Image (tube, rainbow, N blue to C red):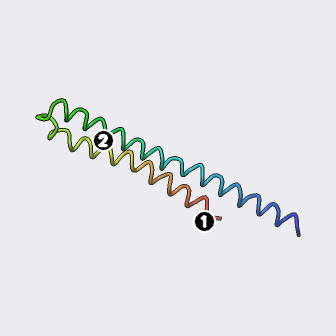
Amino acid sequence: MEDAVISGDLVKMGALIGAGLACTGMGGAAIGVGHVVGNYLSGALRNPAAAGGQTATMFIGIAFAEALGIFSFLVALLLMYAQ
């Protein structure tokens, strides 16, 4: 009986460690969004006339980077609560 409890705790510990590692993807998404917006601002300051045409591209880049963060968050939730 005690062996079953220990192995269950070990599985739960592994799932929580995996969830924590999956959450690093959210930090990566934040860094990605920072790069997208920073590069947009750098280009906008160099050529303000072209900045208006690139705004939609910036938002698409933000959406893709943020989607990866949301996927990693969902993986973390699945690891923590789906058993």
| Residue 32 percent across, percent down from the top left | 40, 41
In the rendered image, the residue lying farthest to the bottom is: 1
Q: Is residue 9 above or below residue 29?
A: below
Looking at the rendered image, the disc whose residue lies closer to the viewer, 2 or 1, is 2
Instruction: Please name the residue shown 26% across and 37% down the image.
Output: 40
Q: Quadrant of the N terminus?
A: bottom right
Dot 1 crowding, Cα within 10 Å, few <14, some 14–19, many 20+:
few
Q: Quadrant of residue 8?
A: bottom right
Quarter of the C terminus within the rendering: bottom right
Q: Nearer the viewer, residue 27 or 65?
A: 27
Q: Mark 2 falls on what kind of element?
A: helix
Horizontal arrangement in the rendering, residue 51 relative to residue 65 (left or right): left
Pointer 1 residue: 81
Amino acid identity at mark 1: Tyr
- Given contact means CB atoms under 8 Å apart, are the residues at marks 2 and 1 in contact? no
Q: Is residue 28 left or right of residue 18?
A: left
Q: Quadrant of residue 13?
A: bottom right
On the rendered structure, is 38 left or right of 72?
left
For label 1, the SS is helix
- The residue to which callout 2 is attached is 37
- Name the residue furthest left: 49
Which residue type carries mark 2? Val
Give the quadrant of residue 15. Answer: bottom right
Residue at the image position 61 percent from the left and 64 percent from the top: 82
Whole-percent x and y of residue 55?
A: 20, 43
| Circle nearer the N terminus (2, 1) | 2
Identity of the residue drawn at 25% across and 33% down = 42
